């Protein structure tokens, strides 16, 4: 199976990969690609980074306990994450050398330079730049990042990636354009990928490559003590976009640009644990760009001598306005059909599954479906269910809650993305915002009885189908099929 290598550079890269992990958990597919995430950030304790790594580790543990054969229908957690080149850390993080204990001037070795070179360094970098420590990243300074990140070609982990890439693999690069790590890292990384430095150069130079460049969609509060100045984000963006247009874009098969005019404002944290930005719809749309690239036919992504045969394809993201009001209501119906087909059904299924586990399963282990697949209290107290699946579900609900409460994109008249409404268990099928469920009889019972419909369908499926393997596999297979049947019956237009 081919690999899709996704380089997530800086905090933005981590946040987009978080949204992608959520989508893959629900069963969104990458066209049979394995996902190989490689996070690049010098800020090892960055809250956005550690949260994403924690989520991906739980995902991997769940996936590894499930065997996805041709006969299994389950799509939850189906995409393999973490088919890593040798030496890439188990936590998916590419560690940059000599950036953890050094100030920038120590990294440069300024004290050992000649007087002329010292004078040049003083002219190129301000005293604040030179004294800046790099343990929390580059703090919005791409001039620092472009120097410190110039070690990609000598990094043993990066060399290992280069030797592992094979014909049929693809590369995707996520970065912001207005910060320090992403703005500096993207053009440097692309330059090396298109060079003759790596051993596997022919495969790498001609591998399909896409990039997502995130323009400002948030700013930070002014803080004279901080090295990050949100007021400079747009100026940095304009300068970088001019450079990309002249020197970068033509090397790519696909270029995705995304941002938001309605700039959210966050607290000013230079990095570390405090930098845990709430999820934003821009990040969900960004994750969908990776899904789009994975599903692009290979004949549209041909390269020769390191250059695309076809001109670079530029893509952007938008919403549909309500035909009556002219504004974006920001629910599932706000997405265009092609985009919606990639994730709507799976997201609804997983939310049904999550609510069933959260609100119903503990009191219903006497049901025939539970007995048939050996799901009992010991199963619910085991690592698979009580640690890894619970952790993913917590991240999933935190993600939805942050999307619903924290950030509203431009053109939405103050609306937030709230795909699911709070409903009682008996009205669980009414929770999908903008979609009215089919009324009437359902599998022999009234749909008003909520979770009883889940038990009814699960009992029928477990009775008529042989469940695969161990209880973990049987459980996931059963409730993927159950939620799929429920969604298809209740929402025939999805």
Image (cartoon, rainbow, N blue to C red):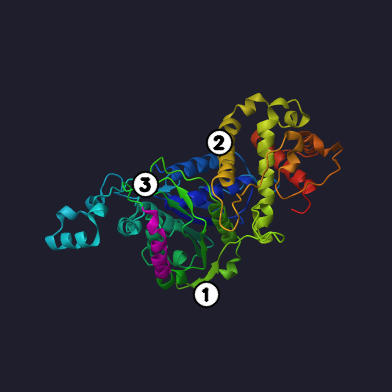
Q: Considering the numbered disc 1 on the image, is that residue within a helix, a strand or a loop?
A: loop
Q: Label 2 crowding class (10 Å Cα cut-off): few <14, some 14-19, many 20+?
A: some
Residue 91 seen = no
The residue drawn where x is 19% and y is 55% is 110
| Dominant SS type (magenta) | helix
Task: Left or right? Give the position of 15 relative to 479.
Answer: left
Which comes sooner in the sequence, label 3 or label 2? 3
Q: CA distance from mark 3 to mark 2?
A: 27 Å
For discs 3 and 2, the disc positioned in front in the rendered view: 3
Q: What range is drawn magenta here?
A: 229-244
Q: Which residue is mark 2?
A: 391
Which comes sooner in the sequence, label 3 or label 1? 3
- Give me the disc on residue 270: 3
Task: Left or right? Give the position of 341 relative to 387.
Answer: right
Q: Considering the numbered disc 2 on the image, is that residue within a helix, a strand or a loop?
A: helix
Q: Quadrant of residue 180?
A: bottom left
**Rendering coords of residue 327 (x, y %):** 65, 58
**Rendering coords of residue 189 (x, y %):** 40, 61
161 inside magenta stretch: no
């Amino acid at each position: 199976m081919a690999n899709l290598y996704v380089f997530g550079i800086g905090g933005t890269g981590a946040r987009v990969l978080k949204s992608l992990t959520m989508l893959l958990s629900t069963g969104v597919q990458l066209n049979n690609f394995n996902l190989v995430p490689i996070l690049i950030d010098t800020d090892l304790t960055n809250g956005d980074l550690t949260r994403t790594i924690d989520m991906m580790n739980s995902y991997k543990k769940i996936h590894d306990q499930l065997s996805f054969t041709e006969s299994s229908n389950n799509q939850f957690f189906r995409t393999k994450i973490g088919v890593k080149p040798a030496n890439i850390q188990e936590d998916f993080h590419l560690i940059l050398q000599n950036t953890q204990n050094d100030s920038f001037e120590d990294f440069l070795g300024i004290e050992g330079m000649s007087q002329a070179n010292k004078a040049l360094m003083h002219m190129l970098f301000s005293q604040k730049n030179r004294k800046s420590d790099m343990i929390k990243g580059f703090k919005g300074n791409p001039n620092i990042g472009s120097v410190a990140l110039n070690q990609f070609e000598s990094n043993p982990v990066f060399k290992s990636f280069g030797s592992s890439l094979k014909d049929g693999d693809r590369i995707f690069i996520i970065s912001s354009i207005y910060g320090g790590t992403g703005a500096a890292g993207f053009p440097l990384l692309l330059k090396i990928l298109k060079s003759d430095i790596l051993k596997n150069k022919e495969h790498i130079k001609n591998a399909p490559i896409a990039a997502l460049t995130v323009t400002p969609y948030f700013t930070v509060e002014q803080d004279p003590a901080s090295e990050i100045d949100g007021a400079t984000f747009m100026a940095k963006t304009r300068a970088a976009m001019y450079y990309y247009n002249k020197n970068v874009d033509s090397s790519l098969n696909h270029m995705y640009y995304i941002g938001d005019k309605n700039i959210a404002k966050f607290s000013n944290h230079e990095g570390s644990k405090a930098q845990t930005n709430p999820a934003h719809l821009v990040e969900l749309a960004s994750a969908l760009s990776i899904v789009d690239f994975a599903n692009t036919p290979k004949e549209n992504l041909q390269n020769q001598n390191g250059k695309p045969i076809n001109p670079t394809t530029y893509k952007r993201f938008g919403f549909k306005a309500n035909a009556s009001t002219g504004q974006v209501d920001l629910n599932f119906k706000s997405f265009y059909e092609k985009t919606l087909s990639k994730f709507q059904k799976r997201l609804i299924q997983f939310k049904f599954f999550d609510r069933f586990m959260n609100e119903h399963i503990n009191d219903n282990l006497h049901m025939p479906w539970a007995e048939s697949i050996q799901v009992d209290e010991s199963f619910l107290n085991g690592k698979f269910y009580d640690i890894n699946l619970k952790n993913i579900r917590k991240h999933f609900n935190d993600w939805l809650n942050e999307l619903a409460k924290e950030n509203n994109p431009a053109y939405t008249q103050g609306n937030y993305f709230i795909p699911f409404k709070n409903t009682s268990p008996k009205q669980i099928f009414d929770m999908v915002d903008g979609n009215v469920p089919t009324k009437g009889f359902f599998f022999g019972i009234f749909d008003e009885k909520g979770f009883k419909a889940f038990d009814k369908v699960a009992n029928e499926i477990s009775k008529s189908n042989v469940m695969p393997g161990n209880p973990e596999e049987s459980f996931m297979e059963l409730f993927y099929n159950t939620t799929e049947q429920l969604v298809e019956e209740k929402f025939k237009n999805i």
